Amino acid sequence: MRLAAFLLRRLLGLVGVLLGMSVLIFGIIHILPGNVAYAILGEFATPAAVAQLEAKLGLNDPLPMQYWRWLSALLQGDFGTSIVMSRPAASLIAEALGRSAVLAALAFGLVAMGGIGLGLYGATHRGRLADKLLTLLQFVLIAVPEFFWAILAVLIFAAWLNLLPATGYAPLSDGVLAWGSHLLLPVLVLASGLVAHVARLTRSSTIEVLDSRYVLTARARGLGERRVLWRHALPNALLPAITVLAIDAGLLIGGIVVVETVFAYPGLGRLLVYAIERHDLPLLQVGMMVVTAIYAVANFIAELLYAVLNPRIRVAGAAA
Amino acid sequence: MPLFRRTLIGSSLAAATLAFRPAHAAGKVLRIGISTSLSTLDPMMVTTGDEYIHANLVFNGLARMREDLVVEPDLAESWTYSDDLRQWTFRLRRGVKFHDGQEMVADDVVASFRRLLDPASTSPVRSQYDMIDSVAAPDAATVVFKLTIPYGGLADILTDRQVKIVPRGASDLATKPIGTGPFKVVSYTAGDRLVLARHADYFEPGLPKLEGVELRIIPEMSVKIAAVQAGDIDVVWDLPLEQVKPLSGRADLRIDSVPTASWDGAILNNAIAPFNDKRVRQAFHLAVDKKEVVDLTLFGQGVETISPIPPSHPFFAKDVTVAKPDPAAARKLLAEAGHPNGIKLPVILPVGRPVRERLGVTLQQLAKAGGFDLQVQRLPYSSFNAEVSGKAPLYIDGFFARPTVDTSLFSFLRSGGSWNERLWHYNDATVDRALDAARSSADPAVQKKNYGDVQAALVANPASFFAYSVNYACAYRKSVGGVKTHPMKWFDLRYATLG
């Protein structure tokens, strides 16, 4: 019962966040400097051509009317049409999102497993040389931005060693190897900083738990170190890691924009950059809503996991 | 130990993947690295250099422009014009097939022009063809244009990027383009690539030689250069000019840098103080050494000019004397114009156009000695048209080459011209007269004389600061043959080979 109430409240919150964001996104996009008609017409933007195009695109209506038209269409599943490309935004976004999802899922898997694994390793080998080296490497990975690693990776693996394709994307129909070889560098670069991020956090929270009195008690009862770590320490040590993984889902989306641009990978991040450059408002609005939704849902899932792992949270949440 | 084991497993997995690096695209497919996604595949709507490449590979116009800027017949076999230059008759090539197998006839040409001239179709270039009064097809192989004014350059402007012939009744050309060109569209993935295949029924026998072309969209220039070095792509389109010298030494690449009619400059608004005073515009020209501007901004890959007519063009006025840079004289002129302490004003630079940003900073430094204290302000280029153009007294901009001198000059410098009204509001009776005279003659000698007059008048009474004609460079792998770098930045790949 308590869990159901908790769920309902969180779901309502999710809807509220999305609605609020829809207003924000629409507002921000419409006060962006520049003008879509000028962006479309480019060097040929004569005043007459601009006026004609603006009328055709319905850009002369009052903003609240444009917002309402957009939102009601969106709620009915009509994602609108990219005004620059004259194609349905839904299919453009779906295709790009599919490709980004592959990239993000692989990177996220790597971040979760690699990050937690390296964190645990660091915590259980605290102070040894391997731990010190890993710590140093992780700080370097966190400190240096993705675009640097991306360009370095292209220079080393494509231009110099000539082992991997520099850019682009190959569909699975071209074969698993072609597909995988195009994904390897982007996934590694995308995951690099976040792996270190999660590993640092897992390491410190695991160390904290391992130093706690109940772990001491467990050890005093004669439990093996392995059982202490997996049965008693890990569930508690993982709570902060889950939160940080949910936050990292947001960072991942930011990283995807960078990585997709450098590796010329045709995903959602590239599409958003394109929409911003060309002032393609319908495409940009829907794209940003999709990103917002992904982020909100990731946080929602993290809260659920949190509640499942730690009953105190749903109790406290229900009591509040 | 577990860490070591994991590293070992990881690196052997990686090595296994690396060993199976996919082979380069099979067969004779030329891969060109371009910069941004194509917004449309409809030739009538193209507005970016990346899109122009597509338009010129997939479609033909009635006439085409060679790399040496000579105009020659394309879908037309020949043309004639009436003595008053108001009626032009084009004889069409017969037996030309569209990519869908239909034969191209005069009705298709008429339909293509009606589509272009229809205000509802919002083609960005419609106003460039508003001298066309009517287009008719008296028979399947003849097209007659009637013009509202005498116009000597009709065949020349029909080489341009948007005036391509499409099948009558074709719909959805933005996604399913059908042309007569040497290559046809196979697939397009926004953000990734445009895949073209050889058009087997192309009207010139034995051409094209390639099996196909891929336009790969790679936004990051350093990655594009790495990709061409690795052999992932064969051509880097529109190489940044600072890369020309460093890459020229590489054994596996051929770097080509050619002069174009694209120009950059400082836009001086003649309608707003201080540049509404001719003496201030003259002083700005005296203050700056254009040769230095070329060296600092373009790394020498360009040449200083008087107007949008590039020095490589036969109509460039070699005999017009331009005063040597003289900062002291510039300050004196400014004082005469009522600015004894020089002029302090902002110069707006387009963020996202690195060459033009560099030009702005160069001018800020060079103009100081002549009494111009410029404050650099940066704005995104996408907001320039809406917020800067026509409003700021001084900003940096530039324009892509147009196919003829008339189209490069008329709307920019003729009083009342559309670009003139937008950019600088210039008004000079000599220029007006010469521009009118040049376009109402089809005789190159008459045109040359009149364009010479225009350039002389621009030196005496500057409209704006035309800094230079900028070069255009491409990097080709040595295996690429039969391609000449085209000053209009598109590609003619009919004779291209991969060896």
Image (cartoon, rainbow, N blue to C red):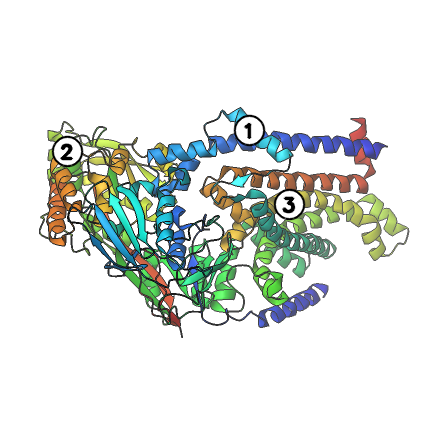
Residue occupied by mark 3 = A249
Question: Given the image, on which type of amino acid does mark 1 rest?
Answer: Tyr
Q: Residue furthest right?
A: A221
Q: Nearer the viewer, residue B109 or A204?
A: B109
Relative to residue A217, is residue A24 depicted above or below?
A: above
User: Is B435 or A212 nearer to us in this picture?
Assistant: B435
Residue wearing tag 2: B278
The amino acid type found where label 3 is placed reads Ala
Instruction: Please tell me if label 3 and label 1 are on a single chain.
Output: yes
Instruction: Tell me how far mark 3 sits from mark 1, CA to CA.
Output: 28 Å
Residue A281 rendering spot, x and y as whole percentages = 50, 37
Name the residue at the front extreme.
B139
Say which quarter of the image contains residue B284.
Answer: top left
Residue placed most toward the observer, B60 or B82: B82
Q: How many marks?
A: 3
Alpha carbon distance from label 1 to label 2: 48 Å
